[in-house]
Each structure stands twice: as structure tokens, then as C-alpha cells.
Image (cartoon, rainbow, N blue to C red):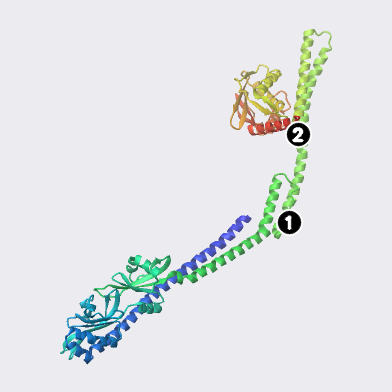
Amino acid sequence: MRTTLLLSLVSVSFGLAALSLLAVHTISEKQIRQEISSDLEHSILTFQNIQAQRRQMLSREASLLADLPVLKSLMTTDDGPTIRDGAKDFYRLSGCDFFVLADANGVPVALFQQGVPWDGAQALSGVDEADFTSTESHYVLRNGRLFEVSSQPIYFGSELSGTKLGYVAVGYAVNDQVVMEVSEAAAAEVIFFANGEIVATTLDAHHRRASIDQKEDLLNHPLNSTDLWLEHEHYIQASVTLSRAGNPLIQLVVLKSYDKASRYLTQLNHLLLALVLVVLLISAALATYISRTITMPLEALVLGARALGAGNFDYPFQKKGAIEIQELSTAFDRMRMRLQKSQQELLASERLATIGRMASSISHDLRHYLSAVYANAEFLGYDAASPAERAELLAEVRLGVEGMTELIDSLLLFSRTGQALQPTYESLSFLIERALQLVRAHPDAKDVSFIYSSLPPLELWMDALKIERAIYNLLLNGCQAAKLSSRGASVEISIVETEDWIRLYITDNGPGVPDSIRVTLFQPFVSEGKQGGAGLGLTLANKIAEEHGGSVALEESRPGRTVFSLSLAKATLGKLAESAQQHAAIATPH
């Protein structure tokens, strides 16, 4: 009960704590993911706002440059080298990372890129001429660097009636400074992809290599927050395409570390685990207190009941615990005392009844034998008796004396059951033969045929005298039962040996054991339907078998066939052998 209570309290406490921990963890994890997803969306919106501001700034700057008379005068020369030489001042004046002057068809005439030295006409290579004919902001990818560019046409005269002299394009580089600004505004990691290649990122070298390996996962989930692992670190990412239809394809990927965002969740989990341990400790302490006040006194009461069931009336009771438990212990103690008193009275009456039955049985048998001895002795006193008659009378006297001797021997053997055995190494078949000889000499075995095939030669360590007496009693019991049969009396003997047992079967063809005595068959002084006997034969045989680790059992009983078995345990016989050998070793002088 204490174990059940303890396990119940601990299980309930642990279950509630685990459910609470799981609920808090699930809700917190969901909240973190929602916050990260919201941050990612905010990051993209922040960049798009910054991008819109930069485009407006670039468009205004390109418009201002296109309206400069000096620039228009330069473009009217329509001479490439002259335009390129004059464009240097305008490039420096613009302060942009990217500067292009193109002719009226959008073909670049002068191009300047930050960080790339001027090399004359060769600097014009690698630029798509279609990039500069559109007045909408767009991206330019050149020499592995990405620029956002805004173009404006240059007119001689008004835009409606004037002549188009060319285009001026200015742009800023999408470099580490730009991605850092976006990262700081978005509180996230940023990657710019151009045609599937990284052109700018805030990731370190290790994470950058990992992102290259997983770029398919990075670029295939636009605007959807998905999970990603880079260098064993958990990220949630979202991506958006920045460029319009056409070349190059520019994509922005924003990542936020879930591990860093969930650190407080880990701390919360540790705190909750500590609370779970505290709850478990409190539950254990509460269960211990309850066990001391309720379950332990009940357990002591249960032990007292078991001791009482085993016949121990002196088991000490400790009247502790709750008041109800103490009252229950007191009531149980009073019941035990009354039960002990009743048992003593019952034992006393049972002893008297047993003594009465024994005295009645013994007196009846002794009176029978003494009457026969007295009558035959009186006849022997007549002088007229012939020698043959005297011999017959003397035989009757001898039978009476032998009957009384057998009765007294049975009583003595019954009183000595339970004493130490005297094991000797004997042949079981020899003991059976000797018991058969003794039984054949008994008057109850007259006209009884004994059936047995060749018995197996079993030599065992056992108390030979007691085993012989048990076999004799079973054979005599079979003869007495078989004589009650209307057919020819017969007794069959057989032996069966198994791995653990040796069983001797005695079968007679008598009318069977009456139902009225089957329950008390092996109790002393129980007998029915027989002319003589004190009712100790089966009792003694069973006691002797029990001393050898076995028993005597009624295997079958019906009219014409009754089977008794005498079982001997090989394990007990082996212990008797060891005991006999030890005694022999001690008795042997060195």
C-alpha cells in the first residue's frame, strides 16, 4: 500500500509537472517561432523601405545630373574618348559606386565602378546595354559585384521636343556595408544572391560555405518561414526575389538563429525541471509522512495478521499512527487474545477427544486379543485336550500376543515420528520382499494373492526400518481392503522412477475407500469396515514418507480398484546420503 501510494503521488506529481513543462515549452516554442517569423517579415519590409528610399535618391541624383548643361554639352560632342575623359569629373561629383554615360541607344560610352581602376575603353566590357535604357531602378551585376542602378535620359532641349543625347546611370553597390545596415535594422543575418551565387552576406566563412551547399533550400521558400541547419545551428529563414523579370535574378534571404532566440526557453526549461524536482521531493516527503502515519502502522497490522495466521500469538504490536489505526490495532489485539484462548480450549478438547478415541480403539483391540488369550489359556488348562488341540490353542494364544505386540509397536512408532532418521544404504526391492514376508504371515493376508513383476534394483539412502514399516502398513491395508471384495482378493505392487521422485504403487481390488473418511483418511485412529486395527497404519506410512520428503496419497478409489502411492523425494534422499557420509567421516579415526 505504501509503495502504491508513493508511486501514485510521485506519478501524479511528475505527470502534472511534465504536462505543465510540455505546455509551457510548446507555447513558448510556438511564440518564439511566431516572433521570429514576424521579425523576418519585418526585416524584408525594412529592406524594401530602405531600398525604396535609395531608389528615390538615385532617381533624383540621376535626374539632377541629366539636367546639368555641362553634361549635356559633353554628350553633344558624340566623341567617346572626350566623353570618357569628361565623365571622370561627373563620377567624382556624384559620389556613387557606379556611374555610366551611354549614347542614345543605351550603349555605354563611359563606365566607372568603385574599386576598379580606370582602363579606358576596356572598362566598358561585361555590361548589358539593355540595363541603361529603362528609367526604373534595376540591378546590374558586373565582375561579381552587384549594383542597384537608376538611369535617366539626357535631352538637348525639353524632354518632349528636344533631342535625346544619351543616358546617365548612377548606382550604389550592394556590399557588406549595405547588408550590415539591413542586418542591424532587421536583427538578422542577410544573404544577397545574384543568379544563384552569393554576392554579399553577413554570415561568417563557415556558415557561408554551409549556405552555399544548401542554397536550394534557401531559395525555394519565398516569403515562407522554414527551418534550416547551418553548421549544426538551427535557423529560420525567409526569402524574397528583388529583381523584376529579366537578368540578373536577385534574391534576398533573411535568417534568424532559433538557437539564440530560444536561449531563454532553455533557461526556462531548466527552471521548470528544477521545479519538477522540487515537486517530486515534496511529493516523496508527503508520501513518507503519510506512510509513517497510515501505511506503516497498517503494514505492521498486516504482519501481525500474517503472524497470527502462522500461529504466532506473541507477535509484538506497535500501536502508532493515526487514532483510527491505533484503535484498529487495539481491537485486533483483543481479537487475537480471544482467538488464542479459544484455540487453547479447542486444543484441550481435541486432545481429550483424541485420547478418548485412542483409548476406545486400543481398549477394544486389547480386549479382543486378551479375551482370545484368556479363553485359549483356559482351554489349555483342561486335561482332556489332545496334543493337537493344545498346539492349536497355543497358536491362537501366540497370534493374540503378536497382535498386542504389533499394536504396542505401532503406538510407539507413532509417538516417535518426527525424530531424526537413521539412514542406511538399502535396496528398496529387498525391503519390499521382506515386508511381503511379514504380511504373508499375518492372518489378514490369508488367501490374498500378491502380483508384482521384477522390481527395479534401486539402492537408496533411507531409514530402512521406517520405510519397511510404511510398506508393510500399506500392504496390510491393501490386504484388509481386498478381503472385503466378493471376488478373489489380490494386491498388486509396482515401482515408477522419475527424474525427481520414486513412487511405489499398492493396488487392491477392494470396494474402495468410503467417501465419509477420505478427508480424514491419514489422521490417526481412522478406520472403517475392518475387523481390527487401531487406525494408525496409513497415518504412520504418511508420516514416514513425509520425513523422507514425500507423502502417501490416494491416487484412485472405486469399487474393484483402489491405488495408494508412497512417494520418496530424491533430493531428500540425497541429503540423507550426505548426512550419513559426514557422520561416517567423523566416526572414522584418522
Task: Work out how far the residue at label 1 is from the one at label 2, CA to CA, in angstroms.
Answer: 40 Å
For the N terminus, the image quarter is bottom right
145 relative position to 317: left or right: left
User: What numbered label is drawn on residue 354?
Assistant: 2
Q: Residue at x 80, y 15 (%)?
A: 376
Q: Residue at x 80, y 18 (%)?
A: 373
Image position of 338 with respect to 430: above or below: below
Looking at this view, name the residue that lies furthest to the front: 119
The location of residue 364, given as percent across then percent down, is 77, 25
Q: Is residue 335 left or right of residue 495?
A: right
Q: Splitting the image into 4 quarters, where does residue 224 fall?
A: bottom left
Query: Which residue is disc 1 drawn over?
Result: 319
Residue sitting nearer the eye, 2 or 107 = 107
Asked whether residue 81 appears in the rendered view, the answer is: yes
The answer to whether any part of residue 421 appears in the image is no
Between 572 and 484, the one nearer to me in the picture = 572
Q: Quadrant of residue 357?
A: top right
Mark 2, Cα crowd under 10 Å, few <14 / some 14-19 / many 20+, is some
Residue 159 is marked as none
